[in-house]
Amino acid sequence: MAEWFPSREWLHTYRAALNNNETYREASEGWGVDFDGDFVFEITDIPTETTIADLPEDLSGEFRENLESLSDEHVDELLTDAPSALEERMGEQDGDDHERLVAAVLSTSISDIPEVTFSALREEYPADLDNLLDQLEQYLNDGTIYAYIDLYDGECLETTVLQDPEARDPGFAIIGPYPHWKDLLEGADVMESIFSEDLELDGSTTTILPYSEAAQELGDTAGRVDDRYLF
Amino acid sequence: MVESTKPSYSGQRVDTDDKWYQLFQKGVELGTWNVEKLFDEIGFKQDKETWESLEDDERAQIRYLLSGFLDGETEVAGDAATNLSRAMGADCLEGNRQKEMFMTMLTLTEHKHTQFLDIYMNEVMDDRDNYAELDPRKGTRVPIVQATGLGEVFEHQGLLTAKAAQTDDPVDIARAATNYHLNVEGILARVGSTAISRLPERANLPLLNYAFKFISTDEGRHITHGVELLKELLEKEQAGKPAYQGVEENIVSTLYEDVPYMADFAYMYTDAVGDPLDFDIDSTLMRGGNLIDGMYNETLGCDIDYMQVMDNVSDRYNEISEWDLESRLEEQERHYQQKRGVAMDGGDD
């Protein structure tokens, strides 16, 4: 099944894809053996202004249905625990309580979700959406997600999303805004992205030079992961 | 790119609407800074004091960087005055008169750059023997330039521009313009200028810095010239004109041929001397990559194989970083001393 990008699950699938890629394995032989070959992908400018309603239909559609199918009694129950931020948002909507609840929740942006979400409402989230929103809450740092990839001698040893960007001190970082990462996953050339400064490489150019094919495969493999985009 | 400003005047022989005319005018307006006046007005006292206070390895680093420029400017001035000027009259090009007019400005400014560097290195820096009397036009480049192989890109420039002047063939002109305007001026000179622009953080050389602001502005117009020239040839190739077929392929192959020497230049003024002024070879090479993408890919729309670019630079970097540079320099100097001996003994020179 296609994984959502960006997410932990996508990163794990990427790791498996790298480790199954014979061309990458051969081209990156020796990488990281006598230097720090680990990477952080810094995905900046995550569009946190995106509302729940604007997320892909696969995610937002089921949630909308869940909310719309709530009984009026359940809505009344939910609203007894509603945080003041949600009440304020509902105050800006038209209709009865149920309609205003649905409209207020769906028009909430990713960055505002923690303010309006509460445990009873969370139970209405479909599993996929719940998981992804939980990850965004955990891993978003000022609009940036830090994905850690440990590469060593032809293998990807570990992938993880960093809660604390300072937790690791990688040898290399590739930094760029979300839309350019999406371009890369859709087939853009990784070295062209770096030379054109769509993505910035932080690390030793002279170390990477002999591994041009590995760098290419690192990008191409990301492009071959079966994925769906959160934004 | 060339701004389309409406010309104030029109003529009959000169097309004042032509973009080359506008580049010429910009050169007349902006390229007339005076080297001697710069020395008089800014002076070189501070530069000399700073130079004398630098450590030996810091001096070597700046000297190597400027030596690349000194030889490069000498070469481009020579080829602009002769081969390139002649090639601008080729039937396959449009607006020959305006292009030739622009070449006069280009030649003038390149000679001024040589003038500045030669005087600066002589007056401010130590009196290192550059074997000037052996004539740089006959291949006697500064030893560090010749020893590291940067001289090879200048050799290439001489060959390509001479061929373009001789054949007037659009593909040959494309190869010459690629080498001259994009690779030498657009990559090598630009990465070097970036290093010089960072010097004030490390060494207070106000005259050098001030002059390089002028030099960089001049180079910008020269690169525009090359880019516009290549665009003209590419458009004709894309329009299907038979004589122009092969232009893009040869632009790209000329990049692949010259790009290894980016490693020579970057290495020469960074790692070869231990990089005490922290010019940083990694950011230097990355800057070169950015410039390649900007000119070849974004502006000209050429299909560049970035892996090929990286592999060519990588192979060359591996080769030169294994060298014993000191012994190569000694070898080069020995060779020049022999040439000097031949000249003194009544040789051809």
Image (cartoon, rainbow, N blue to C red):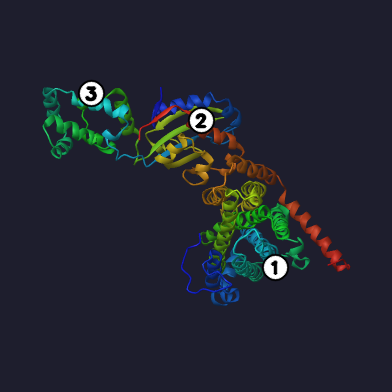
**Contact? badges 1 and 3 (CB < 8 Å):** no
| Foreground: disc 1 or disc 3 | 3
- Where residue A76 appears, as percent x and y from the top left, is 11, 26
Left or right of B69? Residue B300 is left
Camera-side residue of B275 and A174: A174
Q: Which residue is mark 2?
A: A221
Camera-side residue of B154 and B134: B154
Q: In which quadrant is the C terminus of chain B drawn?
A: bottom right
Q: Name the subunit of mark 2.
A: A
| Foreground: disc 2 or disc 1 | 2
| Residue B127 tag number | 1
Q: Name the subunit of mark 3.
A: A
Query: Label 1 to label 3, Cα distance in Å?
Result: 81 Å
Q: Which residue is mark 3?
A: A123
Kind of residue sitting beneath label 2: Thr
Left or right of B200? Residue A68 is left
Q: Residues within 10 Å of mark 2 (few under 14, many from 20)?
A: some
